[in-house]
Image (spheres, rainbow, N blue to C red):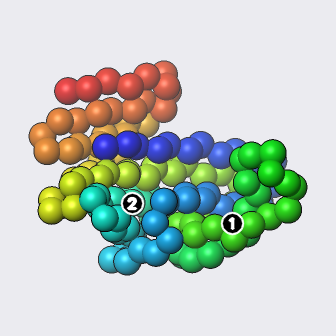
Amino acid sequence: MLIVIDDIELDVAHDLELRFFPEQQASTRDGNTYFTYGEKAKMRFESLTFKYITHTAGMTDAYPRTAEGTEPHPYYAIRLAKNGKTWRNAVAISWSDFKETPAQITFKQEDDLWKFTDRGSTVTYNWNTQAVSQD
């Protein structure tokens, strides 16, 4: 599993967007979860802090991370968006062999502790200390 945590803080409210670019160029959606399927593997992309945000998936223009030019190119993206001055967000990405099911990560917030659990193992992120611990 991979947990991606973002902490955005601005002086004034703006339209904010987080983009994730999976290898596959299509996905299926079930609520706040997206699934992609390759020849050998499956990926589960789940927004864990999904209140007050919008989710979309599809082609979007983005700039490549190479020196092949400065023009935007169309890429398939899973996009999370909101308007605001602050945004604390967590996304869980898990994957499996094509014949298996990617893990579903559970999320629990206890004040400034964010807890992520996968099959009995819990990882905790502490916003005050920025420390990560595993139970």
* Residue 18 location (% of width, % of height): 61, 58
In this rendering, is residue 48 above or below 116? Answer: below
Which residue carries the number 1 mark? 83
| Amino acid identity at mark 2 | Phe
Q: Which corner quadrant holds the N terminus?
A: top left
Q: Nearer the viewer, residue 58 or 23?
A: 23
Instruction: Name the residue located 12 percent from the left edge and 40 percent from the top edge.
Output: 120
**Above/below status of 129 relative to 89:** above
Which image quarter: residue 97?
bottom left
Give the CA distance from mark 1 to mark 2: 22 Å
* Residue denoted by label 2: 45
**Residue drawn at the location 15% of the way across and 62% of the way down:** 99
Q: Is residue 80 left or right of residue 33?
A: right
Q: Nearer the viewer, residue 89 or 56?
A: 56
Provide residue 32's location: percent of width, then percent of height. 39, 70
Camera-side residue of 12 and 98 = 98
Q: Is residue 26 in sight in this rendering?
A: yes
The C terminus lies in quadrant: top left
Determine the residue positioned at 62% across, 75% down. Answer: 59
- Residue 96's tag is none
Q: Secondary structure at mark 1?
A: strand
Q: Name which residue lies at 53% across and 74% down.
A: 57
Is 28 left or right of 9, judged from the image as shown? left
